[in-house]
Amino acid sequence: MTSLSCQSLDVSIAGKAICNTLDLQLEAGQFWGLLGPNGIGKTTLLKCMAGLLGPNSGRVLLAGQAIEKLPRRGVA
């Protein structure tokens, strides 16, 4: 099964921290929600987890491989 994981992920936008040292493991078949007020960075975090934006530090892994090193078609 495919998993998506974040390891010690730090993400910020315009100098404002969105998350610090996020450790998260998502498995195939699970359903998750991300809630928060407008402008807090939900979309930025999701873009980082999708490999569209780079994190300040930490890693995003898809099936155990660094997402930024996978071909976009493979990530899709």
Image (cartoon, rainbow, N blue to C red):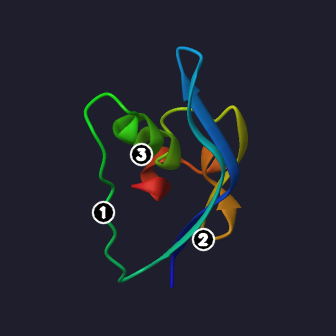
Three-letter code, disc 3: Leu
Q: Separation of disc 2 and disc 1 at Cα?
A: 21 Å
Badge 3: how crowded within 10 Å, few (<14), some, or many (20+)? few
Mark 1 — residue?
33
Q: Position of residue 31 (x, y in %)?
A: 31, 75
Name the residue nearer the viewer: 76 or 43.
Answer: 43
Quadrant in the picture for the C terminus = bottom left
Height in image: 65 above or below 25? above
Residue lying at the far left in this picture: please name it.
38
Residue at left offset 51%, top offset 40%? 48
Q: Mark 2 falls on what kind of element?
A: loop
Side of 63 where 72 appears, left or right = left
Kindly give the residue lying farthest to the front in the view shown: 37
Q: At 35% across and 83% down in the image, what residue appears?
A: 29
Say which amino acid is labelled 2: Ala
Query: Which circle, 3 or 2, is nearer the viewer?
Result: 3
Q: Nearer the viewer, mark 1 or mark 3?
A: 1
Task: Report which residue position mark 3 lands on.
Answer: 46
Left or right, 72 with respect to 66, comes to left
The label number, if any, that marks residue 5 in the structure image: none
From the viewer's perspective, tell me whether residue 60 is left or right of residue 57: left
Which x, y percent locates residue 4? 54, 66
Q: Earlier in the sequence, mark 1 or mark 3?
A: 1
Residue to which mark 2 is pinned: 63
Mark earlier in primary sequence (3, 2)? 3
- Place residue 61 in its image quadrant: bottom right
Mark 1 falls on what kind of element? loop
Residue at (41, 45) in percent of width and height:
46
Q: Does residue 38 lie above or below 72 as drawn? A: above
Contact check, label 1 and label 3, Cβ < 8 Å: no
Q: Residue furthest top?
A: 14
Q: Kindly identify the amino acid type of the residue bearing the numbered disc 1.
A: Gly
